[in-house]
Image (spheres, rainbow, N blue to C red):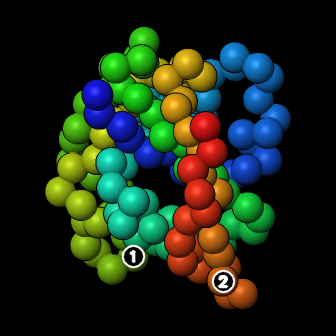
Amino acid sequence: MAVVLHLMPAAAWSALADGEPITNASLDTEGFIHCTDEPRVMLLVANAFYTSLPGAFIVTHVDTDRLTSRCVWEAPAHISDTGQALAPQFPHVYGPIDRAAVIGTQAMVRDENGAFVGYESVAK
């Protein structure tokens, strides 16, 4: 079992109906949902791309064996403002993330400036 992590606004997670799969704009524009497989890299991604967005964020823990969509480890789709890739490869989910594949959620912790600095406990 491989577990990948997907970052999303907590409000978007709360708005999903029971059993409704996770989708987002990148699925429509790029054909896949961005994920990572390392908590350390997730913090780097969150701070590189999401600090300007207000509000709470969560990380979903996704069991790739439970996905009906294909998950592929590939080169980064985007480079951070530093011009550096945040990891050599990232898992991309080519379709919706099934709710049955979500094995846990975890709130991200932000500091007073909006930077992502850690995680709360995993909720199952």
* Residue that carries the numbered disc 1 in the rendered image: 81
* Residue that carries the numbered disc 2 in the rendered image: 111
Q: Is residue 20 above or below residue 88?
A: above
What is the CA distance from the residue labelled 1 to the residue labelled 2? 21 Å
| Image quadrant in which you'd find residue 25 | top right
Q: Amino acid at mark 1?
A: Asp
Q: Is residue 70 visible?
A: yes
Which structural element holds mark 1?
loop
Q: Position of residue 15 (x, y in %)?
A: 82, 35
From the viewer's perspective, is 37 left or right of 107? Answer: left
| Image quadrant in which you'd find residue 80 | bottom left
Q: Front-most of 71 and 121?
A: 121
Q: Front-most of 40 and 80?
A: 40
Q: Residues within 10 Å of mark 1 (few under 14, many from 20)?
A: few
> Nearer the observer, disc 1 or disc 2?
2
From the viewer's perspective, is 120 left or right of 61? Answer: right
Q: Position of residue 98 (x, y in %)?
A: 54, 20
Q: Is residue 91 above or below residue 120?
A: above
